[in-house]
Amino acid sequence: MLASAFFMASELRWNSAVFRRNSLHFYPAINIIGKRVLPLRGAGTWQDYVISRAVLAIEVPDQINDDAASRLYINPITAWVICTETLKITSDQVLLVNAANSSIGRLFIQLSSLFGFRVIAIIRHTRYAEELLNLGAWYVIDSSRMSIYDATMSVTNGQGADASIDSIGGLDGFELARSTRPGGTFLALGLLSGTQVDWARISKELSVHPQLFLLRHWIQQISLSRWHDTFEKVIELVQNGQLNFTAPTERFALHCVKEAVQFAESNKRTGKILLV
């Protein structure tokens, strides 16, 4: 194993009963018979050596370094599938995204520049606004200073967003759903708050289509050729510089995994963590 990205979901698993029942899934770049590949759709990759089915491995081009290679799977594939298959967002539509400064939030913004749809990016700190606008966001809402609903309605002429993607859950998620137009789609993707969105309230009070996205469900229903085709498209975007990842801010040796978890839980973390 050369490098493994540390995801927020990893931290949640570590601290839950799920950790005691399942091997942790991580998606690193490794070296097998002289090639760097992603040994995907396996388990327990927090270790020095991994056995993986060759037919599922994704070869990493030389132009992509280990840091980027270790992050090619979860967020980029999720963002691509949501935009092109789940939501099928068109160029005339508006997408509302919270936690927009997160790794996957930034990917949605970059994909909007490729596909022509508009992203309203929700953040909690104004200092990220200019950076996200330069990245391609259409409009930025600082939820610490203004109402998400009011700001969304103002910029969309009272229509609301065509679709919304929630990575936080709880009341933040409900506010996102409330800012989605009637007939639009509210997609739950993450749970950074640790609290489920109120599905019953959304169904009762709002006229949106609520959905839950789980990458593993997509994986279970696709063919082998589609698996590789999807990676080819995403890898091409990364190679061409059309999809970019923020540089990792911290690195931990594999045997220091407990320290990595503790660091991820602290307020010192400002970006992506890699296990190397």
Image (cartoon, helix red, strand yellow):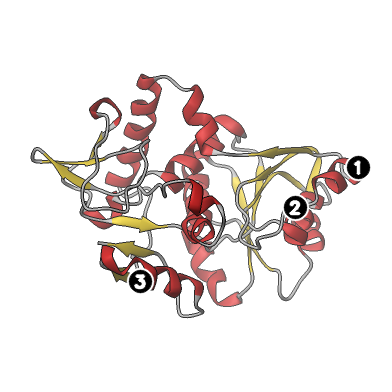
Mark 1, residue position: 204
Mark 3, residue position: 249
Type of amino acid under label 2: Val
Residue sitting at x 60%, y 76%: 126
Q: Is residue 270 visible?
A: no
Mark 1 neighbour density, 10 Å: few (under 14) some (14–19) many (20 or more)? few
Viewer-proximal residue, 1 or 86?
A: 1
In contact (CB < 8 Å): disc 3 and disc 2: no
N-terminal-most mark, 1 or 3: 1
Left or right of 222 on screen, residue 239: left
Residue sitting at x 35%, y 51%: 71
In contact (CB < 8 Å): disc 1 and disc 3: no
N-terminal-most mark, 3 or 2: 2
- The CA distance from mark 2 to mark 1 is 13 Å
- The CA distance from mark 1 to mark 3 is 43 Å
Type of amino acid under label 1: Lys
Label 3: which secondary element? loop
Type of amino acid under label 3: Thr
Mark 2, residue position: 197
